[in-house]
Image: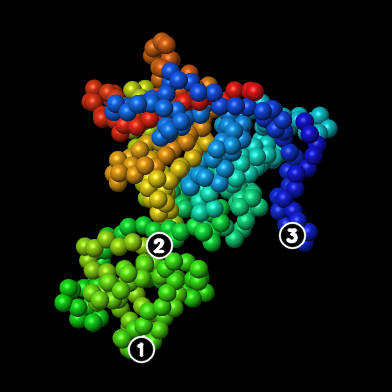
Amino acid sequence: MSTHIYTLMTENSYGLSWIDVPEQADTDNATLALVSEKCIACKSMPHNELDAQHIFIEGDNYPALKCLRTDWKHSVDVIYIDPPYNTGSSALTYNDTRFLKTFPDGTRAKKKHSARHSAWLSFMHRRLLLAHELLAQSGCMFISIDDTEYARLRLLCDEIFGEENYVNDFLYLHGKGKKDAWSRTMTQHTVCYAKDKAFLAPFEAVEKADWAMANADGDERGAWFSGSISFTEKRSNPNHVNYFSITSPSGKTWTRQWLCSKAEMDALIQSNRIYWGANGTSVPRKKIFNGEESRIIPKNIIVADTTRKAQRKLDNMLCVRHAFANPKPVNLIEQLLTMTQMKNCATVLDFFAGSGTTLEAVLSMNARDGGKRRCILIQSPEKIACAEALAQNILPVPFNTIADIAYERAKRIICGYIDSTGKHVAGFGGMLAYYVVKPS
């Protein structure tokens, strides 16, 4: 094992330092080999691996990401990952040369030793550097994590993406929470960074109003409240397409970056949907009436299905209980992707695919709005134990690896399936090319 100390420190600065744990893929080269018999094409669409809509890669994500640089460098719009949390109980499933077993002097590193952070940081550092390369200039990355490595992840991402490109920590309310003697943790972190925040479009969410009580100007349409429709002058980007000036009835001019186009603003002013304040000199705000949906800056608290509900959904789809533990809910990923306001032909990458939730979220969004988003999944063939199947002595075990689970889910959501209750569930259709990572 290398004794090289990797440090994220510059002169007169601060940062992380850890014992670097090398990986075989640091020096080995790899290629992606198409497995034609596992490619999927549904709804009578001819299959051509060159224009396949979605991609599944089986193998270690480190060499796989290196392979993707050839065709996808600076081309991925959104990355979502749910990496190992390094909790100590499950630690890293990748426990070969990448896990710190001994210190440079040969002393054995105990499982609970704080040096396990070195293994995790080495592991994540390599992969996040490659993720940063793959992201488009206007792209962003979401990383799910718990408290174990949250602080170190933030510092690591500050170094790789730049502290100025931190977007927010979107906290997912995941159910009853995890408790100890002192508290119950109700949320899980989803850290978001931009490739370059100057090029990242403002995030948006949709909210339906039902709480308006006042009607400050006696509008005949009834009660309304005002919502922000601009950035402050300080936060405005003069080079943004929505940077322009408007003038109030009192004659005061406001020049800043708005949350709508000039044409949309003109229409709002014409229809008396802009409130200028009692004296006509206040910051312009949009009038929102009860029952209307409005686009708002997203809150950093996300309410989605519980992990328990997501587990039941996956079990029902695969007709096997707990083949994969704690899958993320589909509507959690959908909310994250939707708020980015990326074009509906965006490319989405998940290189810790797990059970394949991200692909289902992308397919669901495409079905809803007619989009052509493309999803790339990477999942290593980690061995699993289908406890339920083994306990019932059901042989053969339906799945041998996590990659098997992700692929089966992909096949079912594309082509349709019969669930555990005997109900037929229609597929979304589409094409998927299947590759494996091969040493070259």
In the rendered view, would you say 241 is above or below 313? below
In the rendered view, would you say 192 is above or below 265? above
- Residue 297's tag is 2
> Hey, what amino acid is under mark 3?
Ser
Q: What residue do we see at 23% from left, 26% from top?
A: 424
Q: Quick check: can you spot residue 302?
A: no
Looking at the image, residue 23 sits to the left or right of residue 364; the answer is: right
Query: Quick check: marks 3 and 2 in contact, CB under 8 Å?
Result: no
Label 2, residues with CA under 10 Å away: few <14, some 14-19, many ≥20: some
Disc 1 on helix, strand or loop?
A: loop
Q: Position of residue 196 (x, y in %)?
A: 56, 56
> Which residue bears the numbered disc 3?
13
| Nearer the camera: disc 1 or disc 3 | 1
Q: What residue do we see at 62% from left, 56% from top?
A: 162
Looking at the image, residue 309 sits to the left or right of residue 218; the answer is: right
> Hey, what amino acid is under mark 2?
Ile
Between 286 and 54, the one nearer to me in the picture = 54
| Displayed quadrant of residue 427 | top left
In the rendered view, would you say 5 is above or below 109? below
> Which residue bears the numbered disc 1?
251
The answer to which of marks 1 and 2 sits earlier in the sequence is: 1
Task: Give the spatial CA distance, label 3 vs label 2.
Answer: 33 Å
Q: What residue do we see at 30% from left, 46% from top?
A: 369
Q: Position of residue 365 (x, y in %)?
A: 34, 43
The answer to which of marks 1 and 3 sits earlier in the sequence is: 3
| Displayed quadrant of residue 410 | top left
Label 3, residues with CA under 10 Å away: few <14, some 14-19, many ≥20: few
Between 413 and 96, the one nearer to me in the picture = 413
Q: What residue do we see at 53% from left, 49% from top?
A: 136
Q: Position of residue 204 (x, y in %)?
A: 39, 58
